[in-house]
Image: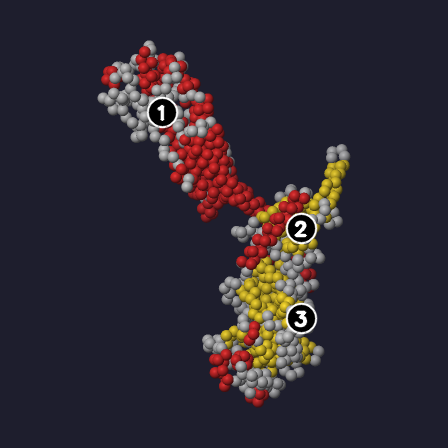
Amino acid sequence: MFLSSIPPPVPDRPHSHTPPHLTVQQIQDRPLPQAPESPSTTELPIYTPVARPHERTITPGSSLSIPTQPTQPQLRTCHSWAALPRYSTYDDSSPSASAWHSWSASNGSDTDSFIQRSSESSVDTFVASELLQHRQFEEDAIQRFQASQLPSDEEWHHLVPRAALSSLPKKEVQRQSIIFEIIKSERDYVSDLAAVEDVYIATLRSSPILAQQAHPFLLEVFSNLPAIRAQHDVLLSRLFERQRSQHPYTLSIADIILDSSLRSTSAYETYIKHYPLAEARHRRELQINPAYASLLEAFSDDPRIRKRDVITFLSRPVTRLPRLALLLENMLQHTEPSHPDAQDAELILSVLRSFVRSTQPGIAASDAKVRFWTLCETLVFRKGELMDLDLYDQKRTLVHSGHLGRKNTQWVDLHVALLDNYMLLTQQEPHLGKHVVVSRPLPLQYLRLGSFTDPPESRLFNWHAPDSFSTSRDQIWPFTVYHVADRAQRRYTLYAETEEKRQQWHDALVDALGVMSVQQESNRWFATNALSKAFRLQGKVPKVKLPGPIVCAASFTLGKEIVLVACANSVWVGFRGDGKSYRKALKLSHVTNMAVLPHSDHLLILYDEQLVSYSLTNIARFLAGDGQALTSRPERVSLRDEHVSFFAVGGMEGRRVVVYAARRSVKKMFIALQLSDTGTPVNTGEEWDRRSLEAVKGKRKDSEDEREDKDDKKGRSKHFVPYGSPFYAKDAYDFAILQKKIAVCTDKGMTIYDPAAPDAAPGLVVPDLLHVSGDKALAALKQRCESSKPLGLVRSGETELLVVFDHFGCYVNMRREPARHGTFVRWEIHAQRVVFRQPHLLLFDHTGDYLEVRDVGTGRLEQVIEGQNIRLLGDISGGPVLLAKRGESVDGVVQDVLTELVQTQSLAPQRPIWDERGLW
């Protein structure tokens, strides 16, 4: 739409007619007079005419033409007055000056009248020649100006005779001076851009100072500056051409600038928005690379640099358009409304103003990014704690920052920074240039807003004058934020200097929390998928009786995915996603856990302190409508005299094993069993439905009599045989099956046992902190481990493991020694259960309100899932993660919702917890 409004280039003005009283032949026959001698004439450079295709050549023989001489420039019209610079041999007392004064005094308007009056005077014999000489001086001065070869005082009025200046209105003289200034500023601007490319970029690209980082560094610091220079080379060329063709009276340049402005805004937008980052990158390189600083110091001696620093050159494109807009505004003030430049200049100013406004948010964002990087480089955290705030993520931003007060036992001045993922409370150390984090960073996932409407309070400020001690009492405005999972210990009342600043903090926090909520929802690592609401958590008994609260659950696939849900006294079975399909399959008392043994036909159920196994095939047949499929007695896995507390299934050295903790007499022992045969394989390829399940009615598993024959003399099914020897672990409450060994959680810590080596040494404690050797960090870690409850052990890297406690986790190497200098990662919650789904650690809060997702390698907080009464169901060694949580209340009945936790990215292949090269 703008391009269509650009006027066509201004045509060259036609030459004046030959005076009527002189014929062309008379002018040709007259000898050209010599110019008066002057002592300084020989100092002028020899002028060589420049042919211009746009200037008409007046051919001899025409009554309306002036012949051209081989060594003289052609005579121009009266609208292009001959100009002599003041530093030339031009003198107002010369005959030619007298001719100019004579013409100026009579206000002649064209060459015809001028030549006519000159012919009637005493100097009419050499006027034409003198004008040609003036034109020669004029073109020489313009060429020297465009080549930057004139003295420093370059002004339009120095290139125009005083007589010509006096003939123009003052307003037009000012307008021409501004046009000249626009062209001059463009010339200097392009010269500076060329210096950047030739001096800085070219040298740094080939210098070994930056080595392999040269290309990304130049791109980050100088951005697309070469592209901007290329566009301004074209603009300057067009302005020079217009100046040469129309000087000294330049009719218009607005059309050229308008076209260039419309074409260059995209390149400028890229550069201007990136500028704060470029400046910060340059300053950082100055600090860390002395060779870079020395090279820039050497550049300052270059005549094109003129002692200016890099920041001056980097800021040239940023300030160019606003300065151009100021010049155009000034030109417009001295332009008549009817002039063609008036409309174009208004359009250019509209484009430039709109563009400058549009870049402000980008500049502000980049500026905030620079302030954010500066903050990150100066942060100092507490010793011992490993903090991964994901600060160098590309999308990380500094939302708001400022000084706030906080009162504990005394007033403390804080510098508070609100990032898009954390809120940081720091104290500035000016002499060190650091920001010391005085309180644990507050994740926005857990941050909640308290009161922002409390009345102001008074704070007493003290300061020391040279000879006195003074005090003042100022009003400060409180507001409160708190950690929703730890309200008692992590509640912060902060004080702003004014009510306006308090409101700014409120708005910034609301915006940041809103953005965080949207990001968490759209970038979830894990999503919850409700499987069924057909269970009652609490409330009155409804008309349609629903099962009670969910205790545990498991699932398997037999053509279709089948889900088993255990309540306190029964086990229900149904198809995944079909809440109406659930049927009561087993009536068992005090069910506490159940799990599917991978790649087998065994469902293990722990009830009444007994561990038994049911056939998955029979369960599927029951769901298909065979009511007799589950009437036979299950296989016993535990012995008759064992009271089982808990169990888990997994794999050890290629074997499918079941490990359970049982009490015999007064001792708690751990028994490991391995599956003696594959059992009946689960056919996951057959399309199972209610009708196809009818086809396997004849495939019912062993009858009760046959199953009795398969039990050994002690009462255990022959499908399960001992693996290794039992071992004892006092005060054990949980364990994890590793690749070769078993990690048992006790009140005294995490202990490693090997069931296959009964003669081995007693269990090894993890981490091994017996020999801390006076190391303060390890001593603090030992004290923290002794006062915490271990929950599990997971692999975090090639040679590292993460020991998970209820409040924190620490890394150990394969020799059980603390890794990463004894640092630890603190959770934001009090964890009760832990699940590992590579590469994430899932931590379940003891209150059941939060589920924390962390990266196992860095400890970084990735996601927080909120709910009510979230409970982990069933086995956690593999397969889907099934949860139960509090649902909605319907007719006075609070539902217990069966939910599956689904990983939203492709699962990485899970590696064994222990490497074959390790000790364990």
Up-down: is 25 above or below 303? above
Q: Report which residue position mark 1 lands on.
A: 139
Residue 431 lies, in percent from the top left, at 65, 42
Instruction: Compute the Cα span from label 2 to label 3.
Output: 44 Å
Q: Amino acid at mark 1?
A: Glu
Say which of 739 and 221 sits in front.
221
Q: Residues within 10 Å of mark 1 (few under 14, many from 20)?
A: many
- Verify CB contact (< 8 Å) between mark 2 and mark 3: no
Q: Mark 2: which amino acid?
A: Val
Looking at the image, is mark 2 or mark 3 earlier in the sequence?
2
Camera-near label (2 vs 3) is: 3
Name the foreground residue: 130 vs 1.
Answer: 1
Disc number for residue 194? none
Q: Which residue is mark 2?
A: 438
Residue 228 image position (x, y, % from top left): 43, 40
Residue 826: x %, y % from top left: 64, 59
Quadrant of res 801: bottom right
Q: Quadrant of the N terminus?
A: top left
